[in-house]
């Protein structure tokens, strides 16, 4: 005879979070439905790490919305090397470095890099809607071509920005998948990008996705950081994110909880 399902008294709290709480109990174990849901989430997280970026489709989508684009590839020749050798994901391949140098568009104020990171699905889903939101706020900026980067770690943006002679580089990169967020996008902003920049010299906005920090809210924070970075000529620990105070007089569309630099892709 099977054990009866015991409801969890915290059930009402589930509407406030995607965390796995109040799942109920059958004897000493989980009920079948939440156990299967956990296994599915685990499989989706693993798949996100190995799924390749459809760069051709991403270029097509960006061109359809008026963005010029460039390609880049790290020194990691394939996914296996990328996962085993993080250092290779932080440097451009020789071919990509030469190609970007030939295509350098002068000295743009900002270059956006859309990178697969540890979740290509995040880059595919979240980058374009975010770019459309933030472009509307940067009408007076010289925006360089969007660089679509494969087998990329965060620091690859430093070399890309240096080669393209950009004042600022913004990495839009797939974050390490969680069990409730296999498609979360991270944003990393670096002033005067160059090889050797440390994590303390960039700002991070994380968990960009409809279920987390929405596109409009993320674009607001990104615009604030970019504007301040250009004015103060710095990013990182010396640049504080006070963007919430700008919206204090008006209701925010989504939670604008402060983000801090993190090490999801190092």
Image (cartoon, grey):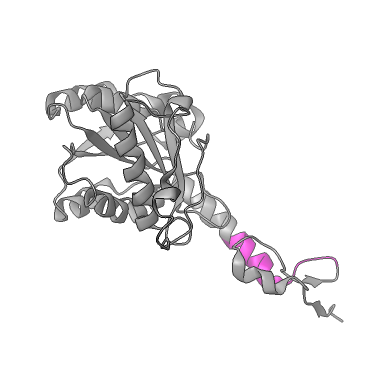
The quadrant where residue 73 appears: top left
Position of the N terminus, as image quadrant, is bottom right
- Please, is residue 211 above or below residue 25 in the view? above
Can residue 123 be seen?
A: no
- Please, is residue 33 above or below residue 163 in the view? below
The quadrant where residue 75 appears: top left
- Please, is residue 241 above or below residue 190 in the view? below
Taking depth in this image into account, of 255 and 108 the one nearest to the observer is: 255
Q: Residue at x 15, y 55 (%)?
A: 64
- Give how far across and how far down residue 17 sits, in percent: 60, 63
Q: How many labels does the image show?
A: 0
Can residue 22 be seen?
A: yes
Task: State whether the magenta stretch is mostly helix, strand or loop.
Answer: helix
Q: Was residue 20 drawn as part of the magenta stretch in this picture?
A: no
- Give how far across and how far down residue 132 sits, in percent: 25, 54
Taking depth in this image into account, of 139 and 164 the one nearest to the observer is: 139
Q: Which residue is drawn at 37% across and 42% down?
A: 116
Q: Was residue 34 drawn as part of the magenta stretch in this picture?
A: yes
Q: In this view, does 164 lie to the left or right of 248?
A: left
- Give how far across and how far down residue 197 sits, in percent: 40, 21
Taking depth in this image into account, of 245 and 114 the one nearest to the observer is: 245
In this picture, which residue range is highlighted in magenta? 28-40
């Amino acid at each position: 005879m099977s054990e009866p399902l015991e409801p969890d008294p915290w059930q009402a709290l589930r509407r406030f979070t995607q965390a796995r709480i109040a799942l109920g109990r059958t004897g000493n174990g989980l009920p079948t439905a939440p156990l299967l849901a956990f296994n599915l989430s685990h499989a989706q997280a693993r798949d996100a790490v190995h799924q390749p970026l459809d760069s051709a489709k991403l270029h097509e989508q960006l061109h359809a919305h008026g963005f010029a684009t460039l390609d880049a590839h790290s020194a990691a020749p394939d996914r296996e090397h990328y996962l085993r050798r993080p250092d290779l994901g932080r440097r451009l391949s020789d071919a990509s470095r030469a190609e970007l140098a030939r295509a350098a568009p002068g000295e743009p104020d900002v270059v956006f890099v859309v990178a697969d990171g540890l979740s290509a699905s995040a880059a595919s889903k979240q980058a374009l809607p975010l770019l459309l939101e933030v472009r509307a706020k940067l009408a007076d900026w010289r925006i360089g071509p969007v660089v679509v980067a494969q087998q990329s770690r965060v620091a690859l943006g430093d070399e890309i920005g240096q080669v393209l002679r950009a004042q600022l580089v913004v990495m839009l990169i797939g974050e390490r998948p969680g069990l409730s967020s296999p498609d979360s996008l991270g944003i990393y902003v670096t002033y005067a990008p160059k090889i050797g920049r440390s994590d303390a010299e960039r700002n991070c906005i994380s968990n960009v996705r409809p279920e987390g920090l929405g596109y409009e809210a993320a674009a607001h924070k990104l615009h604030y950081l970019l504007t301040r970075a250009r004015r103060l000529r710095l990013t990182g620990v010396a640049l504080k994110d006070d963007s919430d105070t700008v919206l204090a007089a008006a209701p925010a569309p989504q939670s604008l909880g402060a983000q801090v630099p993190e090490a999801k892709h190092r």
